[in-house]
Amino acid sequence: MKLLRTVLLSTFILSTNLFCQKALLSKSTDTIHHSVCAILFTDTTGKVAVTGSGVLINPRVLLTAGHVNYNLAKYHHGGCKEKGQISFSNNAFESTNKIHFNWLIDVVSHPDTAEFWKCFSDTTGKTNPTLFIDIGLIFLNDSIKGIKCAKLPDANSLQKIIDKDTFSGAGYGYNNIADSTFTYSMIDGYRRKWTLQKLFIHNDLWVYTRCDTVTHSPYVGIGDSGAPLFVEDNTVAGIWSHTNKTQKPCSYSS
């Protein structure tokens, strides 16, 4: 098994598949995970929207999903200006203290990300996303002050984390399962949290959780890619990356 730091830092949920239903996800407004941020893009018309979530792991470094990058922003949104924004506010759109970054210069995706993304269009079945790492970093010009950084796991934490009963996540994504009417303007910018009771090891890169037992829906929505999964002591156990395309989608993290 690879070092746990690699295992746990590549992760959970990219909601690229659209489900034909309107289901409220199991989330509640979050006011406690101050290290979690919204990652915002600006389209070619000047409109700002949430494209992903992240977490502060160093005063100048954010951890997110590898696919939260300039190329995907352009692909999904029909164009994207080079300047992005970060917000740590409970409502990303109400914040007047947004932090600016450059999508082309300040964002580094893991080299696996390109192969990870290709898997979603592979009809041969020879590859799948869980063979690759999906993590990224955003480097900031200035240190973030007044926000406590999240912890990274040590090299022997995997079994301890899996044995714990409760895990919490937080992100700025859509609060409903998206259907064919979804647009990014429907993401309201509020940071929300959710609670998991069980994780399962898929392989040495990924873990997963099943759908919420009440709503039978995944825990995350579009815009939650890069959102951290925490254990009780503010340690990041994984980063949300994608939803499995099954009748009852499972959420994966690596």
Image (cartoon, rainbow, N blue to C red):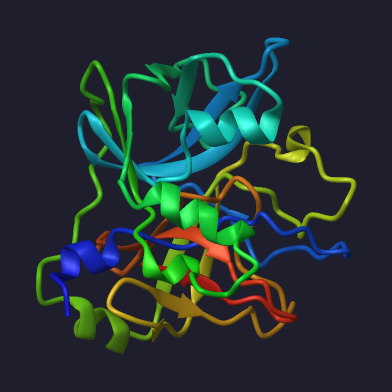
Give the percent coordinates (x, y) of residue 43: 66, 18
Left or right of 49 in this view: 34: left
Q: Is residue 164 visible?
A: yes
109 or 140: which is nearer to us? 109
Residue 13 at what x, y percent from top left?
53, 60
Spot occupied by residue 81 in the image (x, y as percentages of width and height): 56, 14
The residue lying at 11 percent from left, 66 percent from top is: 154
Q: Quadrant of residue 229?
A: bottom left
Name the foreground residue: 224 vs 111. Answer: 111
Q: Is 1 placed above or below 235 here? A: below
Q: Is 193 placed left or right of 159 in the picture? A: right
Depth check, front residue: 22 or 147: 22
Closer to the camera in the image, 241 or 62: 241
Above or below 169: residue 104 = above
Report the quarter where the C terminus lies.
bottom left
Residue 203 spot, x, y in % from top left: 34, 81
Farthest residue to the bottom: give it. Answer: 163
Q: Is residue 58 above or below residue 97?
A: below
